[in-house]
Image (cartoon, rainbow, N blue to C red):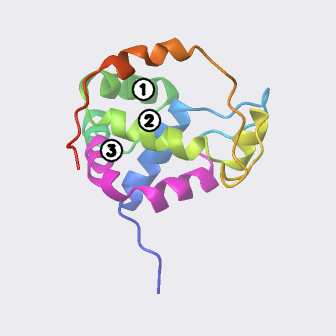
Amino acid sequence: MPETTPLTPAQQADLRILAGLMIPASAEFDVPGADDPAIQADILATLGRDTEPVRQTLDQAAKIAGRPLGELDAATRESVARHLRDTSAAIATLSRVVLQCYYRDDRVLRSLGLEARAPHPIGHVLEDGDWSLLDPVRARAPFWRRP
């Protein structure tokens, strides 16, 4: 059975371009951009409930550009992306989806000095911080229902 995607080929191409603008590849840190095929596949595979806001953002980008983003020069692409950032509420969803998939890529984790593994069952060491930051939460009245 062929794999299906929630986005059209044109939307996928625009997503790749926007993701690459958000997080470009870095030779200095030896990491891919968010337009990397593996990261793009992860994005498409995990869109889930975010599909509609992402689709709306991509449609809005296409409307602003007047044609596929791939047909625009680099400066015009960046201008469209800036305009989208300033006018679209759904861009936050697209950004979150791109960031979550980017930062779970093994190559990115290794570049940050982290093991490319799931956090459980071994866990990660969390350095002690300023526990007084939780005081306002502790002082707050309970908001749950008693059993």
Mark 3 or 2, nearer chain start: 3
Q: Residues within 10 Å of mark 1 (few under 14, many from 20)?
A: few
- Using the numbered discs, state the Cα–Cα distance from disc 1 to disc 3 in whole angstroms: 16 Å
- Of 114 and 42, which appears nearest the observer? 114
Which residue is found at the position 54% from the left and 47% from the top?
101
Which residue is found at the position 25% from the left and 45% from the top?
56
Q: Magenta part mainly helix, strand or loop?
A: helix
User: Which circle marks residue 58 in the picture?
Assistant: 3
What amino acid is labelled 3 in the image?
A: Leu
User: Which circle marks residue 72 in the picture?
Assistant: 2
- Of 96 and 129, which appears nearest the observer? 129
- Using the numbered discs, state the Cα–Cα distance from disc 3 to disc 2 in whole angstroms: 15 Å
Mark 1 or 3, nearer chain start: 3
Which residue is found at the position 51% from the left and 31% from the top?
22
Bounds of the magenta span? 35-59
Image depth: mark 3 or mark 2 in front: 3
Q: Position of residue 129 (x, y in %)?
A: 62, 17
Helix, strand or loop at label 2? It is: loop
User: Which circle marks residue 76 in the picture?
Assistant: 1
Is 98 on the left or on the right of 68, as rendered?
right
User: Which circle marks residue 133 in the picture?
Assistant: none
Is 70 on the left or on the right of 54, as rendered?
right
Is 44 on the left or on the right of 108, as rendered?
left
What amino acid is labelled 2 in the image?
A: Leu
Residue 36: in sight, yes or no?
Answer: yes
- Of 92 and 63, which appears nearest the observer? 92
